[in-house]
Image (cartoon, rainbow, N blue to C red):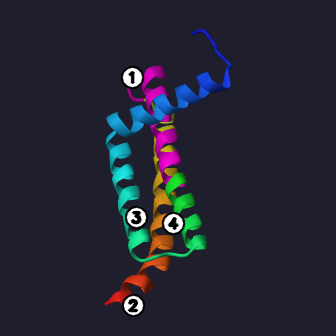
């Protein structure tokens, strides 16, 4: 593999990875749909600037960890196709990182959105 260190080349590679993730990975599509719904809800209930920052950080963390989880899973599958207990641990812990961040993000979302939704009822 030829290494090209230019900033533009690195940016193109990153966008290529993002495009692949959102177009070809089931969890990428799910996370993108959830992010779109949360963004729509945020606009609809007029969250504050601080709440926007928190929501955006939560979305970025969950999606970024999902991307890293996907990359690790693919790398593990390349290294060893058959079952190996250490590969299982790597995959499970990477998935746990996504799950943990998603759970905390849901709790944060409830703290931000629940009072606003209740006030509309």
Disc 4 is placed on an element classified as helix
| Residue range highlighted in magenta | 61-83
Disc 2 is placed on an element classified as helix
Residue beneath disc 1: 81
**Between 43 and 38, which is closer to the camera in this rendering?**
43
Q: Nearer the viewer, mark 2 or mark 1?
A: 2
User: What's the CA distance linking mark 2 and mark 3?
Assistant: 18 Å
Secondary structure of the magenta portion, mostly? Answer: helix
Q: Position of residue 12 (x, y in %)?
A: 54, 26
**Between 4 and 1, which is closer to the camera in this rendering?**
4
User: What's the CA distance linking mark 4 and mark 3?
Assistant: 15 Å
Residue at screen point 35% across, 88% down = 120
Please identify the residue farthest to the top as the structure is shown. Answer: 2
Q: Position of residue 97 (x, y in %)?
A: 52, 51
| Pointers 2 and 3 in contact (C-beta within 8 Å) | no
Q: Is residue 52 left or right of residue 88?
A: right
Could you say which disc has been placed on residue 119 in the image? 2
Quarter holding residue 84 = top left
Task: Looking at the image, tell me whether mark 1 or mark 4 is earlier in sequence order.
Answer: 1
Q: Position of residue 17 (x, y in %)?
A: 47, 31
Task: Looking at the image, tell me whether mark 2 or mark 3 is earlier in sequence order.
Answer: 3
User: What's the CA distance linking mark 2 and mark 1?
Assistant: 53 Å
Q: Nearer the viewer, mark 3 or mark 1?
A: 3
| Pointers 2 and 4 in contact (C-beta within 8 Å) | no
Residue beneath disc 3: 38
């Amino acid at each position: 593999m030829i290494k090209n260190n230019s900033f533009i080349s690195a940016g193109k590679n990153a966008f290529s990875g993002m495009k692949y993730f959102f177009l070809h990975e089931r969890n990428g599509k799910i996370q993108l749909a959830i992010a779109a719904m949360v963004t729509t809800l945020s606009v609809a209930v007029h969250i504050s600037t601080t709440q926007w920052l928190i929501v955006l950080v939560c979305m970025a963390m969950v999606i970024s960890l999902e991307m890293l989880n996907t990359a690790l899973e693919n790398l593990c599958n390349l290294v060893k196709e058959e079952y190996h207990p250490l590969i299982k641990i790597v995959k499970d812990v990477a998935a746990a990182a996504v799950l943990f961040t998603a759970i905390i993000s849901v709790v944060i979302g409830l703290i931000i959105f629940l009072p606003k939704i209740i006030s509309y009822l």
